[in-house]
Image (cartoon, rainbow, N blue to C red):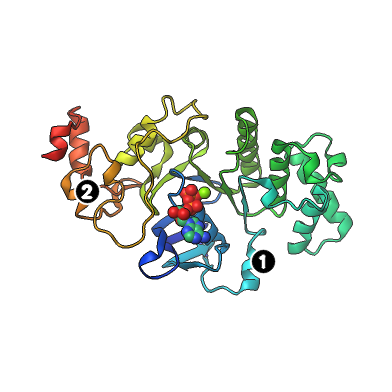
Amino acid sequence: MIGSPLLDVANLSVTFGSGPAAVRAAVGVSFTLEAGRTLCLVGESGSGKSVTALAVMGLHGKGAHVAADRLALAGESLTGVSPARLAAIRGREISMIFQNPMSSLNPAFTIGYQIAEAIRLHEAVDKAAARRRALDMLEHVRIPDARRHLDSYPHALSGGMRQRAMVAMALACRPKILIADEPTTALDVTVQAQILDLIETLQREFATAVLLITHDLGVVAEMADEVAVMYAGRIVEKGPAAALFDAPAHPYTEGLLAAVPDHRSARKERLSEIPGNVPVVNREIPGCAFAPRCARARPVCAERSPRLEAIAAGRASACLRRAEIEAERAGHVLPCREDRHA
Ligand SMILES: Nc1ncnc2c1ncn2[C@@H]1O[C@H](COP(=O)(O)OP(=O)(O)O)[C@@H](O)[C@H]1O
Ligand SMILES: [Mg+2]
């Protein structure tokens, strides 16, 4: 369909269990992703990033209840699509890589065999042709001595090389979208940078759109065109990366950025400087979920739930105090404790 975004997610919710103990892991999540672009989903551990990605892929477990107003790939709705069609889309149109390559690679088969089989699952090519394509992919992801590694088992490769092999497998069928869930979190900094560079290079070459999930703002600064910040299952701020880094609108984004001394270079930093933890959302509670940890909270924040509202071109934020905070920032008046309890 012409004019529709490549990936269109509107009002996605994911709930585990039912009744009062149900966990609302994603609530009202909406975003779009255009061809060739990178959207970063960022937030602390437990904010609902993986659950969102798995729901988009239709890979959520049986215990998850998924609902959405719209979940569409290039105009084709993915909700209510047959399992066979979904299996055809997965890997071919949209594929996913994870933090741990061994969750995708089977230790019992060679790298070359697994990549070739991934291709043969979606395309009518013979074994020899699939093997040539697998070799081509290993060369693309710059695995040295690719011809030899075609016949290597995953355990024979280093962590970084395994992650390259996983990228090769994910991109073997030239999907329109690559979802990468913390793809470099387990790697040391140098290897992390290499994998991110690799993803960017292949993205340009194949015009792949990337949905990159990370808790690491250094990675976001490096990779993102657009950013969606998640907290307690909701997107609390979204917008173009440059604008969001220059002037974060939501106090949570502000807190995340403050936690990283120099977000443009400090890739190792973790988002752990805001005191407290992401709450598990069990029911529709009034108020802003971030309020208990928010330096800018006022009593109203515990009473009313903020909505994600447009604040500028392409930007949105969910904060009841947005206008006031903007004025405070403009006047450089920082909130003090007396203000907070006024
Ligand atoms: N299978 C599950 N059953 C129950 N709760 C789950 C399940 N998977 C995830 N959750 C909960 O959903 C919330 C979001 O998890 P997740 O998406 O994994 O966070 P993130 O990827 O941002 O770290 C967490 O509170 C987590 O405990
Ligand atoms: Mg996760």
Is 284 drawn above or below residue 299 in the view shown?
Answer: below
Is 206 drawn above or below residue 255 in the view shown?
Answer: below
Disc 2 versus disc 1: distance between alpha carbons? Answer: 43 Å
Report if the CB atoms under discs 2 and 1 are less than 8 Å apart: no
| Image location of residue 266, percent across then percent down | 49, 26
Q: Nearer the viewer, residue 140 or 118?
A: 118
Is 10 drawn above or below residue 298 in the view shown?
Answer: below
Displayed quadrant of residue 54: bottom right
User: Of the residues shown, which amino acid type is indicated by label 2?
Assistant: Leu
**Residue neighbourhood size for the residue with mark 1, other residues' Cα within 10 Å, grouped as few (<14), some (14–19), many (≥20):** some
User: Of the residues shown, which amino acid type is indicated by label 1?
Assistant: Ala
Q: Which residue is mark 1?
A: 88
Give the number of the disc on residue 176: none
| Image location of residue 241, percent across then percent down | 43, 38
Q: Which residue is mark 2?
A: 320
Name the residue at 79% across, 58% down: 117
